Amino acid sequence: MFQAHHVLDAGRHNFMGAGKFVIDGSAIEARTVELPTGMLDIKVFQTSMPLSEICGFAARQNPKRGFLFVSKVLGKHIPVLPSKVREVHTRLASQIDPNLPGPVVFIGMAETAICLGNGVFDEYVRLTGRQDVMFIQSTRYPLVKRRAIEFLEEHSHAADHIIYEPEDAALKATFYGARSLVLIDDEASTGKTFVNLVKNMATIMHHVERVVTGVITDWRGPKRSQEMQAQMPLPSTMVAILSGEYQFTPAPTLKLVEMPKVTGTDSFRDGTLRSNFGRLGLPANLYNVDGAAQRCIENLVESVGMPSLPYCAHGQHGEKMLILGTGEFAYPPFLLAERLEAAGFHVLYQSTTRSPIMTGLAIGCRIEHTDNYGDGIVNFLYNARRQDYDRVLLCHETPVGSVDPRLVEALGAETLEFSYEKI
């Protein structure tokens, strides 16, 4: 049954100290965060946005790692203005060398950084005008498709990633002929995930010369950064909005934390995932005004009774709206939210996740529900309450009826299926 967990003991989740200071001429801010799973000490060395605007903190329900940097600009665990999400995409894209050796392959990491990766890719295309680029995402879902590589995210609650070979001939040539890789994730704390990915990609991409890793927050610090560089099989650079380091001291109770089932079945999902929103590769400018994905979004806007976006200048009756993605399906719902915001609607955006996080600090409440991909595992929606919105559009790439009715009921939501077949 539906469960909404609210903060019960906020006193156990508090900042022990916060302020600006300098250590060896480098740190500009430090905080110690007390979590039920341990103590998290952080230092900020460089940032183009205030830490308080970029992220908060919470405890993972994960005995491997008891802390989480909760992004306030990602649109995953905290609802956010689409324009703020786009600002982050642009900030990161503008830091990536516009003259990378081509072809260039962008990879967004499932599930948290799929929207981020696709957005940074689109902004890079817009800023540079380049067409010798493509985007592809990692995924956790088996398909009857040729797998390019598999790799591990060692600290994650769900470790296995799959990257499929593009089916389109031109994208396949770009993929295997790439001379530059751009890997996007929401944060880096050790860099091991990037190292694992690059080592695997190097076995199938024999022409890569440059690797760029991009994150919102880079928490590796000098020592971990050097270790990551030493392990990388190819020359690499990191771009980030914030750079710092952390130290986590686990509490004895961390070993007792019970993690819910977060791994799915091995059954193929081709019947469930009928449209390619990134798992099989996307070309430059798919989401421009003439692209198939953009036409899909415009049709969906009309299907929920809203005026055609180009002609809509004002919000409808001052409605507060939440556009909600589901799991790995994050970027097209974001684009819908972005279009509605640009048209004058009051819109926030976020998506559900399989990541189990305890309530407290940056996690005010959570709604548990069964995933809509057929895994039968618990998924979560954080910091969303029905009373905060007049209208909730719950967007999904899976068939009609696949979304857990408990989530729909909890939010009073309308479900909205995205499919190229509907164009």
Image (cartoon, rainbow, N blue to C red):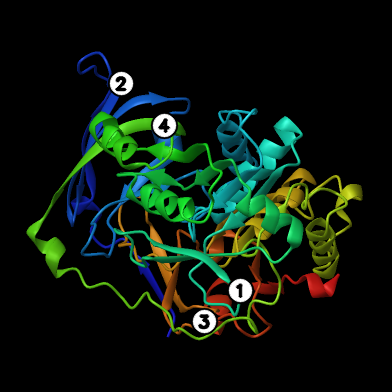
Nearer the observer: mark 2 or 4; the answer is 4
Are the residues flagged by discs 3 and 4 in contact, CB closer than 8 Å? no
Closer to the camera, 194 or 310? 194
Nearer the observer: mark 1 or 3; the answer is 3
Per the model, the C-alpha gap separating discs 1 and 2 is 44 Å
* Residue 242 badge: 4
* Residue 28 badge: 2
Are the residues flagged by discs 1 and 2 in contact, CB closer than 8 Å? no
Question: Helix, strand, or loop for circle 2?
Answer: loop
Does residue 200 appear in the picture of this structure? yes
Residue type, label 1: Gly
* Residue extending furthest toward the front: 206
Residue at the image point whose x is 60% and y is 34% from the top:
93
Residue type, label 3: Arg
**Within 10 angstroms of label 3, few (less than 14), some, or many (20 or more) residues?**
some
Image position, residue 71 (x, y; %)? 44, 46
**Badge count:** 4
In the picture shown, does residue 312 fall above or below 165?
above
Per the model, the C-alpha gap separating discs 4 and 1 is 37 Å
Q: Which residue is denoted by mark 3 in the rendering?
A: 406
Sequence order check, earlier mark of 1 and 3? 3
Residue at the image point whose x is 86% and y is 69% from the top:
423
Question: Helix, strand, or loop for circle 4?
Answer: strand
Image position, residue 41 (x, y; %)? 20, 38
Sequence order check, earlier mark of 2 and 4? 2
Question: Toward which corner of the image does residue 230 lie, by quadrant?
Answer: top left
